[in-house]
Amino acid sequence: MGTAAGDGGRPLGAVAAEHKVNLTAQRPFSEALRTGLAETFFPDDPFRGFGSLPPAERAWGGLKYFVPVLEWAPRYTLGKFKYDLLAGVTIASLAIPQGISYAKLANLPPIIGLYSSFVPPLLYAVFGSSNNLAVGTVAAASLLLASIIEAEVPREDNPELYLQIFYTAAFFTGVIQTALGVFRLGLIVDFLSRSTITGFMGGTAAIIILQQLKGMLGMKHFTSKTDIISVVRSIFLYRDEWRWQSAVLGVCFLLFLLLSKKLRKKKPNLFWVSAIAPFMVVIIGGIFAFLVKGNEHGIPIVGDLKKGINPLSISQLTFTDKHVKTAVKAGFLSGILAVAEGIAVGRSLALIKNEQIDGNKEMIAFGIMNIAGSCTSCYLTTGPFSKSAVNFHAGCRTPMSNVVMSVCIMLVLLFLAPLFKYTPLVALSSIIVVAMIGLIKVKEFLHLYRVDKFDFCICMGAFVGVVFFTMVIGLGASIGLSVIRALLHVARPTTCKLGSMAGGEIFCDVRHYPHARSIPNVLVLQLGSPIYFVNAGYLRERILRWVEDEESASKTDGQDLQYVILDLGGVSSIDNTGIGMLGEVHKSLDRKGITVALTNPRLEVTEKLVLSGFIRDKVGKEWVFLTVKDAITAFRYGLQRSRGKEQSEV
C-alpha cells in the first residue's frame, strides 16, 4: 500500500503499510521486446524446458516438435492399431463418395477427389498433431475455389487450364499455410470468428444444396454463379432438361441417408451405419444404373475413371502473370478458411478426450500436405468435420487411421476405380445435400440472437452475403464487421464507477450491483482496456463526464468531491498519447481541487508512467496504491487530519 500525504506533502505514517506498489522495477528494452514477441508468437511456449537439455537432446526435441510422428510412433502398439484399422476403413468408406462428390462440386474430374484422399493423409500422419482429424476435401472450399477460378477461366472454355489453376491454388495454399505456421502467425486465423464461420458455412451449405438440384433433376446445363438468384433462375431456365427418373431415385437416396443419420442419433453405437451409408448409396446406385442402363434413361452417371495412383502434376503448375493472381487469391481465401475449419474441428474433438493440439503445427502439416498434393494431382485438403467426427466415433487412437484410409484409397485407385464409372450423379448430389443440411445450424443462429445481437449480425452478414452475392463478398463482409467490432472495443472501452460492498472490503460496478454504496467525497473509476491513441480522447471525455456527474450528485447531498481514484488493474498497456491524456485529466481535476490517485498499475504501465515523469511530477509516489481500499483509507485519514487542523485553528 502507498502512503497518503499529510501536511506539506509528508507521508502519513499512520497509514503506512507493509505492501507498496513497486515503482522501481524497470526492464531493459531487449527483455521487454523479447517478452512481447514471445507472448505474441509463442503464447503456448512450446520449447519450455529445452534450455536445460544437452544440445543433442534439444535438437531431437525440436525435431519431434515439428515431426510429431517421432513422438507417438515409438510408443505405438498393436492394441492401438486395431482401433486405428477399424477407424481407417470406416473413414475410407466415407472418403470415396465424398471425394468424388466434392470434386464434381468443384467441376473437377471425379478421380481428382480420390487422388486427394491418398497422398495428403499420408503426410498428415507424419506432420499432424491431432489424433482425431481425418484429412480430405471439403465442400465449402471446393465451391469457393470453383467460384473464384471459374470467374477468370471458365471450365467449358479451357478445362486443362482450369485444372492447372486448381493445382496452382493448392500450391499457394500450402505455401501460405506453412508460412503462417512457421512464423507463428496463427493469430491471423483468429479474425475468422465462430460467428463468421457459422454464417459462412450455413450460407455456403444453402447454396450447395440448391446447386445439387442439377444432379437431383438430371440436368446437363447450369450456371457457374453461386448466388441464390442465379441458381434458381438457372433451375427454371433449363426446366426442359428435368428428368423424373433422377428425381425419384434422388428422393429414395435422400430418405435412406436421412434415416441412417436419425438412427445414429437414436443409437450412437450404430454410428457406423451412417458412416457407410454414403458408400452404400454409391454401390447401390452404381449397380442400379448399370442394370437399367441409367445413362440412356434420364439418370446421368459419373463416367470413366482412370485406374492408377496419382500422376505427378508439378509440371502443370502455372505461374504466368495472367493467371497467378487468380491462383494466389483462390489459394489464400480457401486456405485461410480450410485451416480455420481444420483447427476448429481438431480442437473440439481433442477437448472431448482432454487432449491438446498445436494450431501452428497443424498449419504446417496442412501446408506441407497441400504443397505435396499440388504436385501429385490433388486439390485443397483439410480436416472436414464429417469425416473427422466419424474417425473420432470409430475409436481412432493416433493419426495412423489416416494411413489406413490412404492405403484403402490406393487399393481402390489401383484395382476398383473403373467400377465407379456407373455411379449416378444423383447419388452424389444426395450425399452432398445430406452432408450440407447439418451445416445450417439454425439453433446456433437463434443462440447468437439471444446472447449477442452483434455476433448475430456478423453471422447473418456472412450468410446473406454468400447466399445473395458471392462467397468472397459474404466472407469479406463478415470479417469486416468482426474487425469493426474489435476496433470499437478498443476505441470505445468500458469504464465503470465502483461502489463498496461487504463493509468496504469489496468494490464492484454500481450498475451491476445497485446496492453497492458510493464513498462520500470519493469517485472510484475502473478502466478496463489498454490506453492508446485510439481511445485516449474518449477516455478523457468519459472520465471528466463521470466527475461532473459525481460533483452534481455530491452537491445535492451537501458534500464536495475531493478525490478521484483510477483503478488501472485492467489496463494492460499504455502509449505516449495515453500518458498525455492522464496528464490532461490530472490537470483538469487539479484546477478543481480534486486529488487523483492510481491503484494497482501493471508492470508495463508502471514502467512508462515512471519513465515519462507522470508519477514523479504530477500524481506523486504517495498517491499510487496497491488496492482501492488502501487509497480510500489514506483519503479518510487525510480528511481527518485536515478537519482536525481546521478545528485547532478555530
Image: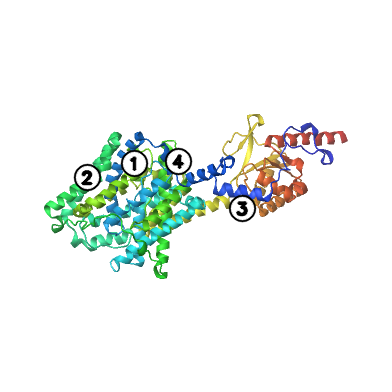
- The residue identified by callout 3 is 535
Q: Which numbered marker is on residue 71?
A: 4
- State which quadrant residue 634 falls in: top right
Which quadrant, please, contains the N terminus? top right
Tell me which numbered mark, 4 or 1, is placed earlier along the sequence: 4
At label 2, which amino acid type do we have? Met
Residue 239 rendering spot, x and y as whole percentages: 20, 61
Q: Residues within 10 Å of mark 2 (few under 14, many from 20)?
A: many
Tell me which numbered mark, 1 or 2, is placed earlier along the sequence: 2
Give the residue displayed 31% in from the left and 39% down from the top: 85
Residue 286 rendering spot, x and y as whole percentages: 18, 50
Residue 548 rendering spot, x and y as whole percentages: 67, 47
SS state under label 1: helix
Q: CA distance from mark 1 to mark 2?
A: 18 Å
SS state under label 3: loop
Q: Which numbered marker is on residue 165?
A: none
Tell me which numbered mark, 2 or 4, is placed earlier along the sequence: 4
Locate residue 182 relative to residue 12 in the image: left or right.
Answer: left
Tell me which numbered mark, 4 or 3, is placed earlier along the sequence: 4
Query: Relative to the observer, which residue lies in front, 53 or 383?
Result: 53
Q: CA distance from mark 2 to mark 4?
A: 37 Å
Give the residue displayed 51% in from the left and 54% down from the top: 484
Tell me which numbered mark, 3 or 1, is placed earlier along the sequence: 1
SS state under label 2: helix
Q: Residues within 10 Å of mark 4 (few under 14, many from 20)?
A: some
Give the residue displayed 28% in from the left and 49% down from the top: 409
Q: CA distance from mark 3 to mark 2?
A: 60 Å
- The residue identified by callout 2 is 280
Residue 441 rendering spot, x and y as whole percentages: 36, 45
- The residue identified by callout 1 is 391
Q: CA distance from mark 4 to mark 1?
A: 21 Å
